[in-house]
Image: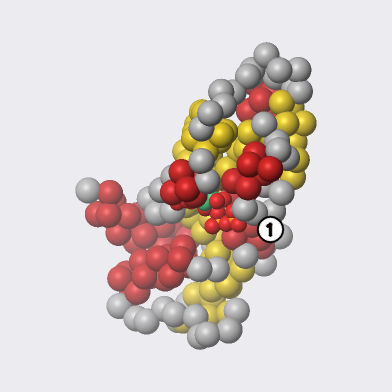
Amino acid sequence: MLTIALPKGRIAEETLEIFSQIFGENFTFESRKLILDVGEFKFLNVRNQDVPTYVMHQSADLGVVGLDVIEEQGLDVIKLLDLNIGKCRVSIGIKNEDELDWSKPNLKIASKMVNITKRYFATKAVGVEIVKLYGSIELAPLVGLCDAIVDIVDTGATMKENGLKVAEDIMYSSVYLIANKNSYYAKKSEILALFEKINSVVEVSKR
Ligand code: PRP
């Protein structure tokens, strides 16, 4: 039996679609149910940012989550496989009419990804004041809350529609299959068998 934490929404649906393809069964969460049992698998429907926590504490053996979340939280989990879905960038955004002023003594940056932001500006040896937000980050520079933002860019539509542009890309992200370290050793053959099956579907999707 393998327990797998999935992030609520589109990524959970796309992952369950991969399982349906592999096992020829229907893998779908009932409307408000948070656990889905199918055969040898138990899926947990959790918030995106909580996936590494369930895996870290071994409440789930495996998880599916974006590299951005893994990097932000820095939890000790095994990255098994890039699933080639949920591709996006983590980028610095500023107002169209502005340029990023690296010489400014204390750049004010709004983001929900505080650690990624801190690390990136540290590598540039630039001091920053980080304003932690929980969403709608693109609003912050428009009302003078910050000089720039660090946020997820997918299609780029949100920045564009709010008069922002990308000043710099910090990292590329996509969704990974992750594993708890103890589970990986205790259930190695089960996990590797699943890994092989998922990998063959993912390889086809890359072509
Ligand atoms: C994410 C991100 C951007 C938007 C980027 O927000 O924070 O706002 O998606 O996508 P785009 O480049 O395709 O426009 P999300 O929908 O997760 O909402 P939130 O910002 O309120 O968390």
Disc 1 crowd, CA 10 A, few/some/many (<14, 14-19, 20+): some
For image coordinates 38% across by 50% down, the residue present is 84
Q: How many marks?
A: 1
Compared with residue 148, is residue 18 higher up or lower down, i.e. above or below? below
Q: Nearer the viewer, residue 88 or 128?
A: 128
Q: Whole-percent x and y of residue 123?
A: 64, 21
Q: Nearer the viewer, residue 120 or 83?
A: 120
Q: Is residue 16 left or right of residue 164?
A: left
Answer yes or no: is residue 87 visible: no
In the displayed image of the protein, which residue is found farthest to the left?
207
* Mark 1 lies on residue: 53
* Label 1 lies in ligand 1 vicinity (Cβ under 8 Å): no
In the displayed image of the protein, which residue is found farthest to the top?
103
Q: Is residue 186 left or right of residue 104?
A: left
Q: Nearer the viewer, residue 49 or 5?
A: 49
Say which amino acid is labelled 1: Thr
Q: Is residue 128 left or right of residue 91?
A: right
Q: For the residue labelled by badge 1, is the local secondary structure a helix, a strand or a loop?
A: helix
Q: Whole-percent x and y of residue 172?
A: 47, 38
- Colour mapping: secondary structure
Compared with residue 104, is residue 194 higher up or lower down, i.e. above or below? below
For image coordinates 71% across by 49% down, the residue present is 133
Answer yes or no: is residue 206 visible: yes
For image coordinates 62% across by 53% down, the residue present is 136
For image coordinates 27% across by 54% down, the residue present is 205
Q: Whole-percent x and y of residue 196?
A: 36, 57
Compared with residue 127, is residue 202 higher up or lower down, i.e. above or below? below
Q: Is residue 18 left or right of residue 149?
A: left
Q: Whole-percent x and y of residue 88?
A: 45, 45
